[in-house]
Image (cartoon, rainbow, N blue to C red):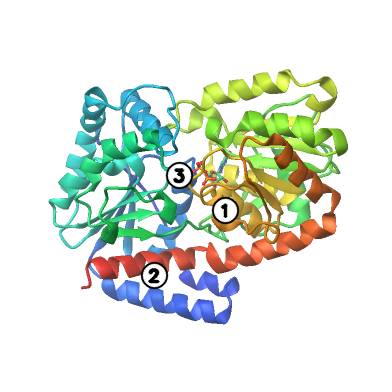
Amino acid sequence: MAALTEVDVAPLAPERFESVLDPEQYDSFRQTVDRSRAMFEGRTIWNVNSTAAGGGVAEMLGPLLAYARGAGVDARWIVISGNADFFRVTKRIHNHLHGATGDGGGLGRAEHDAYEGALEPNVSELAARVGPDDVVLLHDPQTAGMVPRLSETGALVVWRCHVGLDMANDIAREAWSFLTPYVTGAAGHIFSREAFSWEGLDRDKITIIPPSIDAFSPKNQDLDRDTVQAILNASGLVRDGARGRPLFTQVDGSEAEVTRQAEIFEDAPLAPDDRVVLQVSRWDRLKDPLGVINGFAEHVAPSTDAHLVYAGPAVAAVSDDPEGAEVLSESHAAWEALPADVRRRVHLAALPMDDGQENAAIVNALQRYADVVVQKSIAEGFGLTVSEAMWKARPVVGTRIGGIQDQIVDGETGYLVDDPRDLEAYGTAVTRLLEDPEGAERIGGEAQRRVRDEFLGARHLAQYLALFQRLRPT
Ligand code: UDP
């Protein structure tokens, strides 16, 4: 059986960007497109990660590769396979890179063996397909162990780390020690922000490239108010109130309808006029679902009429995240323990993941419906959900950590809470926005402009091109 799966990516026209960028920005993007086409003729750019759905990396790869393909570049997406031991180790590394011990297990010889053993069939298969003029872009810890063998093919191998922490600690250094022998021979290393760069890697090989979102995907495309209501109604999140049909445009341009229901833990569904505070995140302790729930219960619910929705993926669906089910059940227990009058205003939703685009349309509708979006993470690489909400002109309250602080300019494009454990500060910021709809609207408008200028795919693709040109100017 093949170890690798190739994700089919249909091309998208880069010309689409004309409708969202200003003329100068678009002109510069056109030049990127033309240069890419010329530079990559007859070459392939292989992107490799460990899941085709769920999480920020998968979210970004689809559209970026689609626009590259639309520009005439043979950009491909390969997903590796692994066994339970492999994903246990890589989740542990992921947690360590965020400065947390995760399941508390070690990262020693046994873990290296499990890691390398599971990667072996993947790397053998890929090495046979990669040509010496190709580029291989390996994403995250799961693929780091593929660097040495793939470098032997003569291809330009770049490793990108999407996670990190602002102040390195010894837990993170353990993960760096585990991964450094693998990645040190890569031609380049990419981090999402300066503070995430590791000690011990060659400084000259490091490039900073922040993530981006796609303005046209089912996750971010424009939806009118009726459609938002209809999608939330169809997925069981809001009762009644639907006038439109639950339609969205799929990546291939066809129309589709939201039909699947979310699994929701709640006393009663939202009513159409309920005001909503929303966090969309995987069921991961570093997203602090318990803090989101308890902070809302203690510091938002008493002085407002708002409801809280915490939405994450159906837990069976995200194959590289074995902790999901556990965290969902912890969240459920926290919800059950709330006093009845608060509990009826807290809704935990596990969104259907059978169809990634339908899932995205539900997230889109939720983000557009929300009065305030929060991202109360304890650690965060970037936090795509922040830009997603900002693009929809939502006011966002996030913690001052990781890439969240690169997206939110405190007081201008959202609010930053200094201490992730400070539930009162989080609650105060949320309440302030709920009580000042005009201020919230102004912040939302600024947020949208910031995403247009900094966090769309055009900027991201131009940075990749510049890097590849610098590393191998052919
Ligand atoms: N997401 C989703 N459905 C869900 C939960 C999350 O599509 O039920 C998406 C979310 O909209 C975002 C991505 O998963 O695009 C999460 O990326 P982020 O950078 O916020 O966090 P990560 O999961 O990579 O830590």
Mark 3: which secondary structure?
loop
On the image, the x and y values in percent for residue 95 come to: 43, 33
- In terms of depth relative to the viewer, which is nearer, 216 or 291? 291
Label 2: which residue?
71
Q: Quadrant of the C terminus?
A: bottom left
Q: Tell me: residue 409, above or below residue 328.
A: below
Question: Is there any visible trace of residue 61 in the rendered image?
Answer: no
Q: Earlier in the sequence, mark 2 or mark 1?
A: 2
Taking the spot 27% from the left edge, 59% from the top edge, the residue there is 205
Task: Give the distance between the C-alpha atoms of the residues marked 2 and 3, in whole angstroms.
Answer: 39 Å
**In the rendered structure, which amino acid carries the disc numbered 1?**
Gln
Question: Is there any visible trace of residue 15 in the rendered image?
Answer: yes
Q: Earlier in the sequence, mark 2 or mark 3?
A: 2
| Circles 2 and 3 in contact, beta carbons < 8 Å | no
Mark 1: which secondary structure?
helix
Task: Give the distance between the C-alpha atoms of the residues marked 3 and 1, in whole angstroms.
Answer: 14 Å
**In the rendered structure, which amino acid carries the disc numbered 3?**
Met
Taking the spot 73% from the left edge, 37% from the top edge, the residue there is 424
